[in-house]
Image (cartoon, helix red, strand yellow):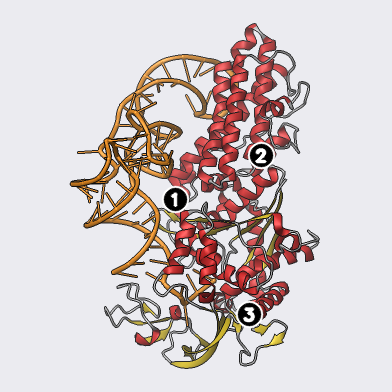
Amino acid sequence: MARHLITSAIPYINGIKHLGNLVGSQLPADLYARYLRGRGHEVLFLCATDEHGTPAELAAAKAKMPVAEYCAEMHGVQAEIAKGFRLSFDHFGRSSSARNHKLTQHFAGRLHEAGLIREVSEKQMYSHADGRFLPDRYIEGTCPNCGFDSARGDQCDNCTKQLDPVDLINPHSTISGSTDLEMRETKHLYLRQSTLKDQLEAWIDSKKDWPILTTSIAKKWLNDGDGLQDRGITRDLDWGIPVRDGEKDWPGMEGKVFYVWFDAPIEYIACSQEWVDAGKGDNWERWWRTDKGAEDVTYTQFMGKDNVPFHTLSFPATILGSGEPWKLVDYIKSFNYLNYDGGQFSTSRGRGVFMDQALEILPADYWRWWLLSHAPESSDSEFTWDNFQASVNKDLADVLGNFVSRITKFCRSKFGEVVPEGGAYGEQEEALIADLAARVAAYQGTMDAMEVRKSSAELRAIWVAGNEYLQSAAPWSTFKEDPEKAAMQVRLGLGLIRLYAVLSAPFIPDASATMLKAMNAEGAGWPDDVAGFLAGLAAGHAFTVPDVLFAKITDEQREDWQTRFAGVRT
RNA sequence: GGGCCUGUAGCUCAAUGGUUAGAGCAGAGCGCUCAUAACGCUUUGGUUGGGGGUUCAAGUCCCUCCGGGCCUACCA
């Protein structure tokens, strides 16, 4: 038994996430966590909400709520939806927790002590009407290069030229529209990542098996231009973790907070402390401190490609720079984006299907199966309603659901709701079992490697093998001349349901639970030995015929949803 | 502009430089009647975006052109 620490990139607090966010981090992380637990490993699976930064403050203002209250409410909403999708976090924490405050300040103090923090005085745009400094993206004006009138302070969306807010003609705040802007002097702390460049590069280079998406992004940041740049880790905001030098005040930094990307990954650690505080565990250090038992932990992170630089560079810089024996990540699984019907999912523009809406129209398993079997691993992938309907109906209703239905109903009509007795395996059964054993091994191989789409294909092939067997064994024919042989065939078929339930649990946990309950076989372990596992459902064992596992998506439903989700969410 | 990813059957995707480029879906045909009109078998379908090169051998490596996407450090 091994020990696995798994974290999903923490979703931003600002609003309900869409299916693209889900498939890029939380869902594959959950798949992996469930699989490893199923194999009998010890798993700590953590996620949290990422609560600081300008967008949270603005969203709270828009909702006319204090930002702390807004975040608390949204955390609750996101936690509920996560439950709805059966995301099996051991704890769902908050980056605004007292634990994270303390730990973030601790890391800052350690980095300061190690000489890895420098103070920089710089000028930033201040908006009098908004009463805040504005990030470059919140300033718009006319592009000096192409004349586009909605160019942002960092870049012109029209001609793609990199800009500085002072370059803009007639700059204004996108928050209030105010043109009453002023360049003000402000002081910030920078993390001297450049000092750690060689150390980080050697570490990245040692990771030969990471996805190319992960390492190529990291190397680009390490080597592009002048190499890895120091990064500002503080902001002039109200909502956030106050800048402190460990336990001490930080002279000159009063009223400032740490940058969200400095404190967010630290929440991975703080979350394990929250997990202990919540009474769910009793020792977080054996997961995080290599001097206190975490030496044998394998740590895997899941994230969308936009998060890669922070997880390959800044967070490791924080960890390494602290000089303390914190656990570093062992494997970073990153994903491309899921697009929606010819364009991007967009939280800000309300385009696509959001997690709450998805659960309103269909159970979690439908979404989990489609999203995971189409996970954007090698390139961006696309959600269309036609594809969703076709895939889900075929895979879940026809291949798996109908298999369960046909064998349980046949058994009920000929032998009653009990595993029938008699007969012995023949050549055909031995061949099936050998085939299944090979396929299960292949499935384990791809799951261990976190190859999500390939794993779904292997799993589906295992389901198909059941239908192939039934078709050629034809117990409905056998029953007429040799009821004992038919009993054996049906017994094996029923055993397959239990096998499928256990193997499929990481993908479709609810259906898996329904299958196990119907087979009266809750608590079945992993089928390390397929033949032995199948024999585990013995003659005389009572079961019930479950309700339809997966109802098909009708054309009417699909058309309705296509129309309903064609526009933008308001 | 720069960097990276990507382009393979109508669709979604596979293929350590090594048989005749494979699966699923969709289409066609046949079979089965236990089942959610489900299942199984067979089968049609390819100038691997274009062009050039390296190699005994290229979807794979190199050059070039074309298309799509992402990132480019103050959104997170």
Q: Quadrant of the N terminus of chain A?
A: top right
Percent of width and height locating residue A391: 48, 40
First reached walking from the N terminus: tag 1 or tag 2:
1
Callout 2: SS: helix
Q: Mark 1 vs mark 2: same chain?
A: yes
Number of other residues with Cα within 10 Å of mark 2, as a class: few under 14, some 14 to 19, many 20 or more: many
Cα gap from disc 3 to disc 2, whole angstroms: 51 Å
Give the residue displayed 46% in from the left and 55% down from the top. A212
Q: Is residue A178 visible?
A: yes
Look at mark 2 in the image and give the residue it sits on: A512
Q: Amino acid at mark 1?
A: Ser
Does dot 3 land on a helix, a strand or a loop? loop
Could you tell me how far apart the alpha carbons at marks 1 and 2 are, in whole angstroms? 28 Å
Q: Is residue A532 left or right of residue B76?
A: right
| Contact? badges 3 and 2 (CB < 8 Å) | no
Labelled disc at residue A378: 1
Mark seen at residue A396? none
At which x and y percent is residue A266?
64, 70
Asked if labels 3 and 1 touch by Cβ distance under 8 angstroms, the answer is no
Q: Earlier in the sequence, mark 3 or mark 2?
A: 3
Q: CA distance from mark 1 to mark 3?
A: 39 Å
x, y (%) of residue A430?
Answer: 62, 19
Which residue is under mark 3? Answer: A114
Residue drawn at x 71%, y 47% is A41
Q: Mark 1 against mark 3, which lies toward the viewer?
A: 3
